[in-house]
Amino acid sequence: MSYTKQSDGTYSVRVCYSDSLGKRHEKKKKGIKTLTTAKKWERDTLTKIDDGEFDKFSSNMTLNDAFKTWLDSYSQKVLPSTYRKAENFINVHILTSKWFDQVKVDKITSVMLQTYINELSTLNVNYRKNLYPFKQVMTNLVSLEVIN
């Protein structure tokens, strides 16, 4: 954390932190008129960091957010047609109002998952192959200790 008084009399603040993946980040704000306001911005930012608001993966995120983050990295690794196929399966079969649309990741239980898989197996012959994105997202959430 650092406060710097600029030549125009305003302050700039810089807060450095590491996210849940261990990656270093920083938040900056310039043009703050008083030192008191700069300190308040710093406190608010530190509170948001502690609450996990800037983490890509956190327990208060929805499964939609987790899939969006996963799809962003997945798109760099596969052909566009493979990406579209995975995205379509996620939107049509996983993130539906009946199942996991806007569900917080820490509210997902093993019973919910098993019930979902049982129903999906009756609707889709290749359900195991198509569940790859879901498995990847859930594995990431478990390995990052966002969920058990």
Image (cartoon, helix red, strand yellow):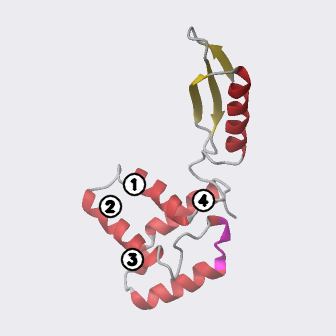
Give how far apart the Cα atoms at labels 3 and 4 are. 20 Å
Residue 119: % across, % down? 50, 88
Residue stretch in magenta = 106-110
Marks 3, 2: nearer the viewer: 3
Picture quarter containing residue 146? bottom right
Give how far apart the Cα atoms at labels 3 and 2 are. 14 Å
Circle 3 packing at 10 Å, graded few (<14), some (14-19), many (20+), is few
Q: Specify the amino acid type for callout 1.
A: Tyr
Marks 4, 1: nearer the viewer: 4
Q: Considering the numbered disc 1 on the image, is that residue within a helix, a strand or a loop?
A: helix
Observer-nearest residue: 58 or 80? 58
Q: Would residue 117 appear left or right of 71 to someone viewing this image?
A: right
Q: Which mark is residue 74?
A: 1
Nearer-N-terminus badge (2/4): 4
Q: Which mark is residue 83?
A: 2
Q: Considering the numbered disc 2 on the image, is that residue within a helix, a strand or a loop?
A: helix
Give how far apart the Cα atoms at labels 2 and 4 are. 23 Å
Q: Would residue 90 appear left or right of 137 to someone viewing this image?
A: left
The answer to whether 50 is drawn above or below residue 135 in the figure is above
Instruction: Please give the residue where the numbered disc 3 appears in the rendered image.
Output: 92
Magenta includes 91? no
